[in-house]
Amino acid sequence: MAVSRPRSPLFLQVELAMVIKKKVTILGSGSAGLTAAIYAARANLEPLVIQGLQAGGQLTITSDVENFPGFPNGILGPELMEEMHKQAERFGTQFIYDNAESVDLSSRPFKLKTSSDEIHTDCLIIGTGASAKLLGLPSESKLMGHGVSACATCDGFFFRDKEVFVVGGGDTALEEATFLTRFASSVTVIHRRDSFRASAIMANRAKSNEKVKFILDSVVEDILDVEEGQVTGIRIRNIKTNVVTEHPADGVFIAIGHKPNTELFVGQLELTENGYIKTDGVKTSVKGVFAAGDVQDELYRQAITAAGTGCMAALEAQWLLENEHEEGNSVGKPQAEAKEPVAQKG
Ligand code: NDP
């Protein structure tokens, strides 16, 4: 049984000392969060980054990044994030290796809790990104890690000389299908339509790979075999003919897009109908809270656009704080009393 002791003044002092006060706190350490950190740190705002448990964001589970400017020969995703982290650290960014468990955006300073810290922050930049979507089949969750995966880069290695299936028709699905041919004996893409959302270059790369096959106009009905505790096959239905077929399989990779990580902000920030944070530029519905990267971007969802909006969010935070400082520290005053951020100069 837990023993509760009376709280001495010393205990209260220690408890108060656990509150970290910051001008700018950044949630998330993908390219949006780290770019925001670089800019905020260089503006002497001494930002704090709450990294999240998947530190580095989605690029850490990618192999080659070929479209980030400045790397003509491509760069590995984890390496790119490592470099961004070092750059943010160099200018004095502080990092907490934890998830935010709760946020209170009802008044400024905003309050955040991790498993061990409470943070009070004048401005908050949200760069919590998005996570892989799943099909929602019971067999999919039961066999996750036993032949079902949402990350070819992470798990492809385990499918040497095996037959694998990739579900989806976007860039991720076709990139993963091509990547998996390095290991698997055959890769079959299952897509619910007969045309691809993926870019032409990615689609052509997959189509011209002789190890890649396609089953179009089709959806996954079930992944077999839960009773055996591992993937042994896949049941597919053609949505035009309704014909159901079963195919032997060793692995199933789900690559059907991502959902924004916005659970913490439901009821506190305006969200779009798909659950992304609604923004005007990078401003959210709450003054002092900015959102950058995939968490607010349903359209572009690129590392470079995330970095761009991370930069914008840090500049907006900087301008708001400067403005409020000139006004005589209006943090905590009602919204209407605070002046709008000034327009960017030069
Ligand atoms: P997308 O949203 O672009 O594509 C998702 C795909 O999954 C679509 O083909 C969609 O079908 C299908 N899908 C969605 N839900 C289901 C479902 N429940 N059942 C079956 N199929 C489903 O996501 P991606 O992850 O592919 O790409 C995200 C962004 O990242 C894009 O902008 C992309 O260009 C970019 N990207 C760039 C890369 C690169 O340049 N190297 C690599 C990977 C991604 P439908 O088409 O019918 O909607």
Image (tube, rainbow, N blue to C red):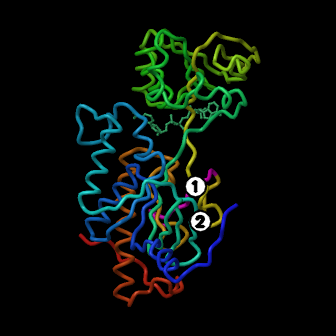
Above-or-below relation of 286 to 132: below
Quadrant of the rendered structure where residue 342 is? Answer: bottom left
- Helix, strand or loop status at disc 2: loop
| Mark drawn on residue 262 | 1
- Helix, strand or loop status at disc 1: loop
Between residue 304 and residue 105, name the one nearer to us: 105
* Picture quarter with the C terminus: bottom left
Between residue 217 and residue 329, name the one nearer to us: 329
Crowding near the residue tagged with mark 1, few <14, some 14–19, many ≥20 C-alpha atoms within 10 Å: some
Q: Position of residue 186 (x, y in %)?
A: 50, 10
Task: Decide which of tag 2 and tag 1 comes sooner along the chain.
Answer: 1
* Tag 2 residue: 269
Crowding near the residue tagged with mark 2, few <14, some 14–19, many ≥20 C-alpha atoms within 10 Å: some
Name the residue rendered at 23%, 57% in the picture: 90
Above-or-below relation of 317 to 147: below
In this picture, which residue range is highlighted in magenta?
274-283
Query: Mostly what secondary structure, the magenta segment?
Result: loop
